[in-house]
């Protein structure tokens, strides 16, 4: 079972994988405006959410309906978003009693990896380079303000803020509580992502990508290309740290190879599905089969890719309403020169999702 309505790029990738491999996937629709309805995978929706809020009784009812309708002993729940994952962990005993399977580590370890300050401290204690930390709100710019924890003191979900101009600093200081954040230097350089599934038995499914274009303010990745960072020595400390901590499951770790020092610097970790998941699949690397195998779900057929696996491209992310993109060691001129190969990898320019692509571009 997977919650749709959010992180739709990853949900579509999971749905493509499930259809190709013969795994039974059931989606919880996100309502009238859910992007999944504009793809062929809308047929996998078995129930629509009536509210954006999550209700434990409703989630347990979804599990019960699937078990009764299909005769399942248990229902594995895909780790689709940070918000949903934290809900699942908070209510794990009740969800498991209802027949659900939460494919995540325990709540304390999950928070140690996903909370940005906790993971930075964990990495620093292991000798992994992290950005320099300021004791208080810096007077100069640029810098990054990162939430200490997922939720602030007022219970509001917080996101990192890139502070690049005096106006950014003034806006942050006037709208956010400094007690909810810690402050790091802004590391410039090659933007790399280590992508992994670590199985309970120690097996590793690994890939990596280089981020080339991103929505402003550290938003969603628009363009990335395949990279071999997962094969480099700089990737190994992260994998050892995760293993030593007892981690299993999906994880994406963002790393910057600092232009000034050449060191690989940890930026953050996300132990869940990620938006550009399709690139890993297009490279022929399957993180979903071991994820579900860890929890008793066999994959009838192996994943095979017909794509070259060079680029990940989300053309809808270029819509003007998102603002100008940030380039990472890449340029508009390079984008034009590479466009034929980039366009061939367009995430939604595929037979199962043309309607979604048209809708995203039409609403630009």
Image (cartoon, rainbow, N blue to C red):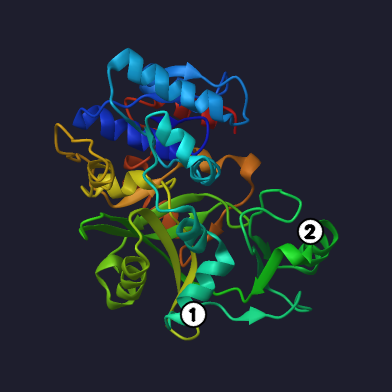
Q: Quadrant of residue 335?
A: bottom left
The N terminus, quarter of image? top left
Q: Quadrant of residue 229?
A: bottom left
Left or right for 158, reference 288: right
Instruction: Report the residue marked by disc 2.
Output: 176
State the residue in front, 227 or 6: 6
User: What residue is pinned by disc 1?
Assistant: 124
In primary-sequence order, the first of circles 1 and 2 is 1
Observer able to see residue 258: no
Q: Is residue 42 above or below residue 239?
A: above
**Residue at the location (36% across, 60% down)?**
247
Circle count: 2
Marks 1 & 2, CB-CB < 8 Å contact: no
- Residue 171 point in image, percent of width and height: 81, 60
Q: CA distance from mark 1 to mark 2?
A: 26 Å
Neighbor class of circle 1 (other Cα within 10 Å; few <14, some 14-19, many 20+) is: some
Residue at image position (72%, 75%) is 141
x%, y% of residue 186?
60, 73
Callout 2 crowding tier (Cα within 10 Å): few <14, some 14–19, many ≥20:
few
Question: The C terminus is located in which quarter?
Answer: top right
Can residue 171 be seen here? The reply is yes
Residue found at x 63% / y 79%: 133
Q: Is residue 51 above or below residue 303?
A: above
């Amino acid at each position: 079972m997977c919650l749709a309505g959010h992180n739709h790029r990853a949900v579509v990738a999971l749905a493509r994988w499930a259809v190709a491999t013969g795994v039974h996937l059931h989606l919880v629709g996100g309502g009238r405006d859910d992007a999944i309805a504009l793809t062929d995978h809308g047929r996998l929706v078995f129930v629509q959410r009536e509210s954006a809020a999550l209700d434990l009784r409703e989630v347990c009812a979804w599990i019960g309906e699937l078990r009764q309708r299909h005769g399942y002993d248990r229902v594995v729940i895909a780790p689709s978003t940070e918000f949903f994952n934290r809900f699942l962990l908070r209510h794990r005993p009740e969800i498991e009693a209802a027949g659900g399977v939460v494919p995540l580590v325990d709540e304390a370890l999950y928070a140690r990896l996903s909370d940005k300050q906790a993971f930075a401290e964990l990495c620093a204690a292991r000798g992994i380079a992290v950005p320099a930390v300021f004791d208080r709100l810096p007077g100069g710019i640029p810098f990054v303000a990162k939430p200490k924890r997922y939720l602030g003191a007022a219970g509001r979900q917080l996101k990192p803020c890139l502070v690049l101009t005096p106006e950014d600093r003034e806006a942050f200081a006037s709208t956010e509580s400094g007690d909810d954040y810690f402050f790091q230097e802004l590391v410039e350089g090659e933007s790399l992502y280590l992508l992994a599934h670590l199985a309970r038995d120690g097996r590793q499914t690994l890939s990596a990508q280089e981020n080339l274009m991103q929505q402003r303010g550290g938003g969603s990745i628009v363009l990335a290309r395949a990279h071999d960072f997962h094969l480099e020595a700089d990737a190994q400390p992260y994998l050892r740290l995760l293993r030593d901590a007892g981690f299993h499951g999906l994880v994406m770790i963002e790393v910057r190879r600092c232009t000034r020092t050449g060191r690989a610097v940890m930026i953050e970790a996300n132990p869940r599905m990620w938006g550009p998941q399709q690139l890993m699949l297009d490279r022929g690397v399957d993180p979903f089969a071991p994820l579900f195998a860890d929890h008793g779900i066999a994959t009838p057929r192996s994943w095979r890719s017909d794509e070259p696996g060079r680029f990940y491209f989300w053309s809808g992310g270029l819509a003007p309403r998102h603002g100008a993109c940030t380039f990472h060691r890449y340029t508009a001129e390079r984008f034009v020169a590479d466009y034929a190969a980039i366009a061939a990898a367009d995430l939604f320019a595929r037979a199962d999702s043309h309607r979604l692509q048209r809708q995203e571009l039409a609403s630009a």
